[in-house]
Amino acid sequence: EIVLTQSPGTLSLSPGERATLSCRASQSVSSRYLAWYQQKPGQAPRLLIYGSSSRATGIPDRFSGSGSGTDFTLTISRLEPEDFAVYYCQQYGSSPWTFGQGTKVEIK
Amino acid sequence: QVHLVQSGAEVKKPGASVKVSCKVSGYTFISYGINWVRQAPGQGLEWMGWISPYNGDTNYEQRLQGRVTMTTDTSTSTAYMELRNLRSDDTAVYYCARGSPNDFWGQGTLVTVSS
C-alpha cells in the first residue's frame, strides 16, 4: 500500500498569501494518478487537480499542482476567503487507492 | 448535469448490516466506475473500493474484504454498498464518487453504529 504523508498538518495564512502544500509518497506514484481535493465542513470533497497538474473543470487558475515520483505539491497562488478548507492528496494508480491525512488551511 | 444522490442517514446496532444507495444521473452509468469513500467523524478520507457498472468488476480495500459488497443496478443507474457485521468504528459518512479521479461526489450518508 502506498502511504501518502501531507505536510504541514495545518497552515495558518492570511487572504492574499501564497499556500504551498506537500504530499510525499512512500513509493513512486505515476504523475498521471495523483489528485488533490478540497473539502469544506459538512461538504463532500471537490476535485481540484488530477494527473498531478491538470485543473478540474471550473477550478480557478490560482490552484496549481506539480511534482513527480514521490514528491507532489499543491500551490494556491493567492488565497481567497473561500479557499480556507482541508486539502487531501490521493493516488489512484496502485491499488488500494489511498489518501493523505489532509492539510488544513486556516485563516491567520 | 451530473448528480449522485445517496440514501438517507442510518442508525444501526453493532453486528447489523447497512446498505447505502447512490443514484446517478446526467451521464451514461456504465461509462464510469463508482468508488466508495468513507470519513469517520473528524478524520480523513478512506477509500473502500470500486465497482465497474459496465461488467460488475470490483476491487475492495483488503481490510474490508469479507464485510463489504458493492453492486450496481444498471436499470435504475444506482450503485449500492453493503457493509456487514458493523462495529462502532464503522461510524462515518459514506460517499459514492464517480470515476478515478473522483470527479463527482454524492452528498454523503451518515451511518451511526451504536448500541
Image (cartoon, helix red, strand yellow):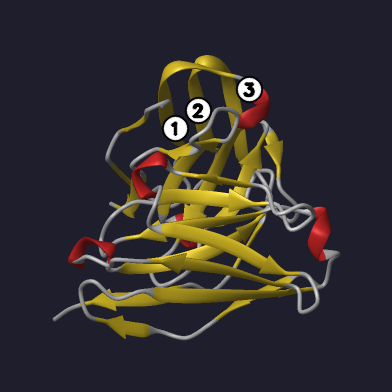
Residue that mark 1 sits on: A20
Between disc 3 and disc 1, the foreground one is 3
Vertical order, A14 against B19 (above or below): above
Residue at x-position 28% and y-position 77% = B112
Say what amino acid the circle numbered 3 marks: Ser
Q: Residue at x 71, y 36 (%)?
A: A54
Q: Residue at x 36, y 74 (%)?
A: B17
Discs 2 and 1 carry the same chain letter: yes
Of residues B91 and B67, the one nearer the viewer is B67
Looking at the rendered structure, whether the residues under marks 2 and 3 are on a common chain is answered as yes
* Residue B77, x across and y down, in percent: 75, 73
Dots 2 and 1: beta carbons under 8 Å? yes
Q: Amino acid type of disc 2? A: Thr
Which comes before the other along the chain, label 2 or label 3? 3
Q: Is residue A81 left or right of residue A61?
A: left
In which quadrant of the rendered image does the N terminus of chain A lie?
top left
Q: Position of residue A45 (x, y in %)?
A: 51, 59
Q: Earlier in the sequence, mark 2 or mark 1?
A: 1
Residue B9 position within the rendered picture, expressed as x and y whole percent measured from the top left = 40, 84
- Amino acid type at mark 1: Thr
Residue at mark 2 = A73
